[in-house]
Image (tube, grey):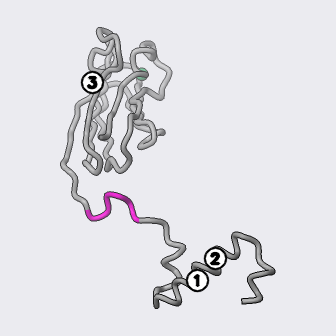
Amino acid sequence: MDLVVLLRTSEIIIVALVAAALATGGVLAVVFTPPPSPCSGVTGAIRSFTIIADSTGYNMSQYQTGPWPIVTVQRCDHVVFNVINNATESHGFAVAYYSNAGLELVGGAHLKLEFQAIKAGQFKLYCTIPCSVHNLMLNGLLTVT
Ligand SMILES: [Cu+2]
C-alpha cells in the first residue's frame, strides 16, 4: 500500500478501519456510529421522589448539615422527581448533567422532571432561580450507582 506513506496518522487509522471493515464484510458506516447508550434496551425500575420547596428549602434542608435531599438510584433506572412549590415565590429544580436547565415553578406549582439515569456518579440537585432561601436549595444530591 504505497498510498499510506502519504497519509497522516489519523488518515492511516481510518484507512485501517476501512480495510478492517471490508475484510470482515462489515458495513463501513458502523465504524463511525457512536456506541449505543449503556441503557439501550434496558427497562430500569421507576424511582419516584417528592421534592417540596418552601421557606425551609427543599424537604426541610434548613435542618440538615450535609447535602439534602439525598436520593440514590441504580444506573438505567427511570427517575421521576415530583416537585411541589409550596411557597408563594418562584423556585427552580435542576439536576446537574441530567437537566441543567431544570424546572421553573411559580408559587403553588407542581411539576415533574423525568429522565433515565444513564450515567453513574453524583449529581447536584439545585434551584436555578435566585430566591429568598437560595442557599438552602443548592445542595441536594442524586447518586447513580
Ligand atoms: Cu429557590
Residue under pointer 3: 52
Residue 32 in the image: state x and y as whole percent: 54, 73
Q: Amino acid at mark 1?
A: Val
Where residue 17 sits, quadrant-wise, is bottom right
Residue 35: x and y in percent read: 44, 65
Instruction: Give the spatial CA distance, label 3 vs label 2.
Output: 53 Å
Mark drawn on residue 14? 2
Residue at the (78%, 81%) spot, across then down: 5
Query: Where is 66 relative to 113, above or below?
Result: above
Q: Is mark 1 within 8 Å of ligand 1?
A: no
Looking at the rendered structure, the kind of residue marked 2 is Ile
Magenta-tinted stretch: 36-41
Picture residue at 74% right of the left edge, 82% below the top: 4
The dominant secondary structure in magenta is loop
Q: Nearer the viewer, residue 49 or 44?
A: 44
- Residue 46 or residue 7, whichever sits in front: 7
Q: What distance separates the C-alpha of mark 1 from that of mark 3? A: 55 Å
